[in-house]
Amino acid sequence: MVSAPRVSVRNLTKVYRTRRGAHVALDNVSLDIDPAEFVVLLGPSGCGKTTLLRCIAGLEEPDSGEILIDGKVVFSSKAGIYVPPEKRHLSMVFQSYALWPHMSVLENVIYPIRNSGKPQREAARRAQDALDKVGLGKYAAAYPGQLSGGQQQRVALARAIVSGDGLVLFDEPLSNLDAKVRERLRLELLSLQSQIGFAAVYVTHDQTEALALANRIAVMDVGTVAQIGAPEEIYDHPVSRYVADFVGSANELEGTVVGTGDALRVRTAFGELKSANFPKSIAEGQKVSVMIRPEHCDVAADANIDNRITGRLVRSLYLGAVRQHFLETEGGELLITTQAPVTANADGNLTVTCPPLRVHVFAQGT
Amino acid sequence: MSVDSAAPSQSGFTWWSRSGLTPFSFVLWLTLGLMALLIIYPLGLAIVYEYDNIVASFHSLVDGPLSRTVPTVILNTLIVVFGATAIALLIGSILAWINERSDASLGFIGQLLPLCALIVPPVAGVIGWAVLLDPRAGLANFALRNLLEHFGITMRTGPFNIYTMWGLVIITSLYTVPYVFLVVSAALQRVDPAMEEASRTGGAGPIKTMMRVTLPAIRPALAASLLLGVISGLSLFSVPAVLGGGARIDVISVYIFRLLQSYPAQTGPAITLSIGLLALVQILLVLQNLVTRPGRNAAISGKGFRATPVRLGKLRWIAYAVAVLYLLATAVLPILGLLLVSLQPFWTPAVNFSTLTLANFSFVLFENRQTVSALINSVTLGFIVASFNMLVTGAFALHFARNGKARKLADILTGIPATIPHTVIGVAFILAFSREPLRIYGTTAILLLAYIVMTLSYAARAAASAAASIGGELSEASRVSKASDMKTLWRISLPLAMPGLVAGWIMVFVHTVGEVTASAFLSGTHNPVIGRVLLDLWNFGNFPQVASLALVITAISASLVGLMLFITRRSQRLTTS
Ligand SMILES: Nc1ncnc2c1ncn2[C@@H]1O[C@H](COP(=O)(O)OP(=O)(O)OP(=O)(O)O)[C@@H](O)[C@H]1O
Ligand SMILES: [Mg+2]
């Protein structure tokens, strides 16, 4: 890392105390976000994504740990520092847009600039600029109640980018919109980010969105970060079954390791499979989980390739971009996806292969 | 506020931030604490000062000179309060049921019903009925006698006499109906009609369904409105003060008032009876809590429903008639009576339309020093009290919108005054503030303090619901847009809550201007207010002036309530568009 991180979260713990007892929403979470980096927090509902975001924003006070923004401590339980949201120099986009209904679109966008002490004229100019950027220049005088959901979300984006902060937080900003609008806004968001160069922390539980937007993805398990890395890394080298399962779809099966070395040999219901994608700690005789992604299976052309699985082709679905096929094998069902149509041989069977690098092996229980 | 926003951001936890207190919230707590003190201090002080008199009064109440009258007074009070509440419970629930569940939905009248007691202050309403149904000079009685004469029935008085127990009970019940209507309507809105429909499809008729399903489901609401009715009935002063004299029927609030007015003032018995009154209300509160203990009534679910209305058929016209009759009785008829009397040089049942004059209004509004200064005082006090209470409760509700504990504590504090009959507040204030260190009896200040206490609950409830309608993310969005908490309050929360706060302001204002109970106790020639002056004029027999003044405050109240309806409707339109 050349430059200092924009945001540094260190050993953050947040406990909600309710009448029903204490709930650990964040458990010793650490995370660094570089300037101009787009980090996506991905995880199932209730895993603490919003809580982490709100702690960074200063809307929630953590129980312990430290948060630094641009090298400045904004929260530290040890030093007893808590900087309120308005002094953290960041912006946030809320899931509900949170536009102020009593202010016009322009007034909504001017508000944060005025609050950072800029004169009215400059603020108005910058606000108009920002609205033009998100394509809503014409709507400056309208009120939020008169805009569509997508337009409202654009105003919220304009309001967040307008004050020129180095850090923008997004809490599922696109989840209320339909698929088409969502895709378009995603692109706009990326181009805005590359124009302006802010660091983004973006919460979602939509994996497609995460993969599309992120420089790095942080996959969260309940209260913890399960894995953080580039989208390819998360997708191709998940460190646990949990991560593999959450990102992309997967065929999963149990197995026992029967041979180690450069490649692992695992006995499974599909027969013996060779894997070149496994943690170092795996030992012979160990029970493991095996994961194969549907799109990594090829219809076998060459009889000499490893990891051959044969099954009866029971159903093929045409999904537009890809085709999905269900194979019934002796060891259970296998799902594969292909670009081209496949045909079974005369007895209705199909044989597929999967390269050892694409066969993931995890210690059981991860 | 300046300390808060100028504090260096890394100075570490100050004492303030550690305790979660900012200077602003500290001021809020302080104000609320002072207001709590204003509730407790007078009562406590009165008891301490009058301790000897209280002890002595036991003797006179049990076997002294008062022992002969007090039991009658208590009996009268019970008859009036429970009789009126029972009637109000019946009428109010029927109206609520018609409005919520039948196909005779009342529409605009349904919106007006709960506001009746605001539009026409009870004191104006009862005076209106008195001029209609006075046995001799009552306008309605006179008209009826003329009518009966055509049938050969001749009467010198009557046929109705308002100065009776029946008169007291019925007029009191008129002004208790809105409480019942509001509470029962709210409850009906929350009862899942599916329960009722299940009963209907199970073969039970509408009446049986109502008795077996609907009524039990809204039992907590019925208990709550019973209690509300009793509390408001116990402290309703205007009806017995206007009618009780002629009927020679004393109820407790008027009796206590007269104990204090007699010479020498019998403070001991007065405060003892007040404490008894307070105790009665608190016991009723406990009983109500027992009845409505959660879990025993699992019927209520959260969402708003629209029930398939019960078809009333021809009965629908009866339903409409009940509603219209109620509106006539609370508003239209008394106003008509007041109007006819106020336009005459003197009160006579035979209205001579050629001598109608506006002289009484101009006298009351411009010439009579007592009524003019009463109007000025009442309106000024209403303005200050409404503004102060809404400011404090509004700031509190908005500032602590996300702090459940603070809100709960404030709820409890601000809820107390609603459980103290106004008579008790009047007595306590007189006794506590007639001597050092705070000798303010006879000044407008004492009225100000009393009104602030008495309307605190209304204000707090209005403020809480106004604050609850704003989503938390709107103010959070302001915080991350670099606005301090004070600025957020000012620029975001306050404007958004404004319609609700204004509605609350109007409620408090109207209540203050039409207040009679504490006004009778605390106001005098040096600090006249409308409530007191109305009673005085009535007792001195200046009927045309009473009628004009009563109409003036009715006009003020009605136009403000109209404004309130307009504001709330418009803000509903804004937020739903
Ligand atoms: N104010 C609160 N009081 C008590 N518990 C809370 C509070 N806010 C969140 N929680 C709990 O903390 C956990 C994490 O909540 P959080 O809102 O961070 O989840 P999330 O990952 O954003 O989920 P989603 O995807 O559904 O938005 C949840 O179990 C939630 O119940
Ligand atoms: Mg969330």
Image (tube, rainbow, N blue to C red):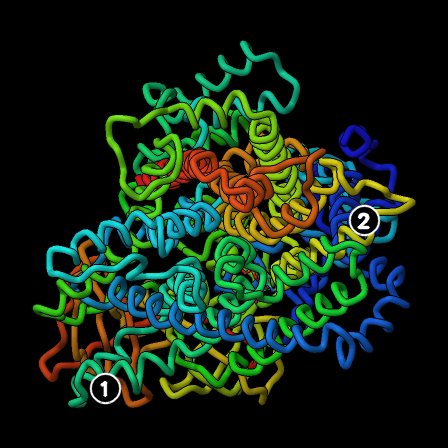
Q: Is B246 or B417 nearer to us in this picture?
A: B246
- The quarter holding residue B210 reads bottom left
Number of residues whose C-alpha sits closer than 10 Å to that of mark 2, classed few (under 14), some (14–19) or many (20 or more): many
Answer left or right for A205 relative to B274: left
Would you place residue B551 above or below residue B405 in this image? above
Please indicate whether residue A154 sits to the left or right of residue B318 in the image. right
Chain under disc 1: B
Residue B528 placement (x, y as % from top left): 64, 36
Which residue is tagged 2? A76
Disc 1 target residue: B208
* Quadrant of the snapshot with the C terminus of chain B: top left
Location of residue B374 by image quarter: top right
Instruction: Determine which quarter of the picture holds residue A271.
Output: bottom left
Q: Is residue A144 visible?
A: yes
Q: What is the secondary structure assignment of the residue under circle 1?
A: helix
The relative height of residue B317 versus residue B218 in the rendered view (above or below) is: above
Q: Is residue A186 visible?
A: no
**Residue furthest out toward the top:** A121
User: Which of the image's four quarters has the N terminus of chain B?
Assistant: top right
Q: Is residue B87 left or right of residue A8?
A: left
Q: Residue at x 57, y 48 (%)?
A: B516
**Chain hosting mark 2:** A
Going by the numbered disc 1, the residue's amino acid type is Lys
SS under mark 2:
strand
- At x 69%, y 73%, the residue is B279
